[in-house]
Image: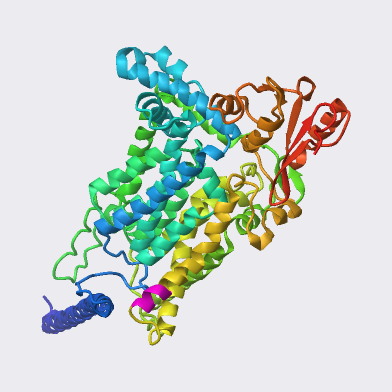
Amino acid sequence: MSDEDKKSEPKIEAEEKAEAKAEAKVEEKVEAKVEEKVEEKVEAKVEAKVEEKVEEKVEAKVEAKVEGKAKVGKGEKPTKTSTSTSTSTSTSISIGRDDHLFGAGLGMTYVAWLLATARSLGFARDEGFYFRASSEYARWFNLLFEHPGMAMEKNVVDASWQANHEHPALMKSLFALSWHFFHEKWHVFSDASTAFRFPGMVMMGVAIYVTYLFGARVYSRRAGAMGAILLGLMPNVFYNAHLACFDVPIMAMWILCIYTYWRAETKGGVWRALLCGVVYGLTLDTKHNAWMLPGVFLPHAVLVHWPDLVAFPISVVKWIRGPKKVDVKASAPPPAPAAPAATLAVPGSIVAMATVGPLVFVALWPWLWNDTVARVQEWFNFHLHHEYYNIEFLGKNYWGPPSPKAYAPVMIAATVPTVTVLLFFIGAGDRLRSIFRRAQAYTARALSMPAPKGFAEKPDRVQGDVLLFLALAVPLAVFFLPSTPIFGGTKHWFPAYPALAIFAGRGFDIIASAFVRVTRWTLTGKRRQIGDALLAASVVIAPLAVTAHSHPFGLSAYVPFVGGTAGGADLGLNRQFWGFTTESLAPYFEKNAPRNATVFIHDTAWDSWARLVDEGRVRKDLRGVGTPSEALFSIVHHELHMAEIDYNIWVEYSHPTPDYVLTHDGVPIISVYRRGAPSPR
């Protein structure tokens, strides 16, 4: 070693020591900073949790004291309660047995109303088809009870479930079982049609019950109660809730499936996730609207779980890359990145719906037990390429696409009671504002900026507001597509109505809270109760009156905002379809038709006419025929495209004058022509 090397060696050692010392100091400072930051974040989180708990307890105690004072004012003993305040937001409140009883009571009351009015409502075209199909299924169920082995044979299954196999089986199976037990076996219902219709009515009760629970948990009991009531007080919903059809059942299953998913998100647990899968399978087996539910769940799941969804692929990439290159100057090599989690962070409810749901769907539809793939494909094709029936809108007949984009908004404004629509805008506007403020607060936190001033709303971990907006928007969105058929009128977007009603309940909650604040010094004790009751009655009375008055012409009825039934006719909105109004002619035929008279039944389905005659809803001696040329009497259901039927009858009967015109609020619903001269008046 040269003298120069010997001289430079101590210098190099000194430099290395200095560098090591500096690096140690850097590490020390980094550790200190990390500790400091961790402490700050922990403190902030603890502080936030404490604030949240304090706020919850203060709210609960304030509510308890208010209730206690109110009870003392009434001479009652105050009790400790823990209820949500009227201004509560999307944080789930505690729901107990009384809430379930109250919600179920609302539902059962509505079902009783439907049963009381069912006899006066004629049979829609589709009901006739479902009566016949359900009768076939009932024979199979009877065989299953008595000879299960024979019932499960391939040829027997296919022959029994061939009828109306373009629609899923759940509701028709329930129609069949209801008819078998409640009409044939136990004689609960004297009319076979009421037994067929009963499961659909029960599903309306379920929709009201779930709407109450959902609204109560997300907002408040008051919001839930008003939402559930307003859901039932819509003329179109009331009409359809009587029927042995699928439109009200899919509305019930839609909101039940979303509610079940929301509960799985808020509470967790494997059994809740599995229940969600089962309910989705039942929804698929109710009606094809269930295809749209992933449009609700997937965006919501991404919104709630995006940190986990983003973290997973990042962890995979890091794991594949392996540890960073070793720094020769470092005292120890860096640790290898942890292996990614064994499973992707996807909600269990989504997994269950994708796996358990289809299994339940196939298991409950015997038609799919054989040639499953081909028959599922046939089912999809039928509905994806459904025949485009015509319908009138604003005085024009639409015989095919493109559908008018204004159809859904106009029909909602014309058929949903106006007070419900106004309350919806108040409630939905409040929740949109809340979503916007939460987004602002989140952005501020992400950028280490102060939250928006005056924003103290509790965090909504599962985004209940967003879920309800998706539940509302997805069923309506398809009706803004030009190729979507509109022939079914409002019934095809019924799944949106529970969410609409819950937002309306929230709107009422806001108004009721303002009313309490304004009258807090003038209304106390019993006066407060009377004032609150009058406020609720002022909201409910108009929808109740409109709904009750619409029966049995629910599809012809329009709300006063557009001028009622007459206003709807003047606007050129559809007056009816399905020929369901024929039963309302029974008093006329009773008085004017001779024995064994022949009647051209026009738009009444043959199965529906047979049921009317069989149950004595029209005279049993009347004979339905298929053309005016065979008939003594000819009826015409008034729809824009039916005008040619009038002309044909005028030619056949040699006069243009109806013998009788059935009207609702002065609007012609059915004209009855009589061969020869009209009856003297």
Please report the bounds of the magenta region as a residue range.
526-531
Regarding residue 438, the answer to whether it shows in the image is no
Magenta: main secondary structure: helix
Nearer the observer, 188 or 564 = 188
Q: Is residue 640 left or right of residue 235?
A: right
Locate the C terminus and report the quarter of the image it occupies.
Answer: top right
Residue 14 is situated, as x and y percent measured from the top left of the image, at 13, 84
The image quarter containing residue 671 is top right
Regarding residue 20, the answer to whether it shows in the image is yes
Q: Is residue 667 left or right of residue 295?
A: right
Residue 42 is situated, as x and y percent measured from the top left of the image, at 20, 76
Position of residue 440 relative to residue 365, above or below, is below
Position of residue 147 relative to residue 566, above or below, is above
Q: Is residue 345 left or right of residue 401?
A: left
Residue 237 is situated, as x and y percent measured from the top left of the image, at 53, 49
The residue shown at (38%, 32%) is 188
Q: Is residue 503 magenta?
A: no
The residue shown at (39%, 76%) is 441
Which residue reaches farthest bottom?
521
Locate the N terminus and report the quarter of the image it occupies.
Answer: bottom left
Nearer the observer, 252 or 670 = 670
Nearer the observer, 182 or 486 = 182
Residue 352 is situated, as x and y percent measured from the top left of the image, at 32, 43
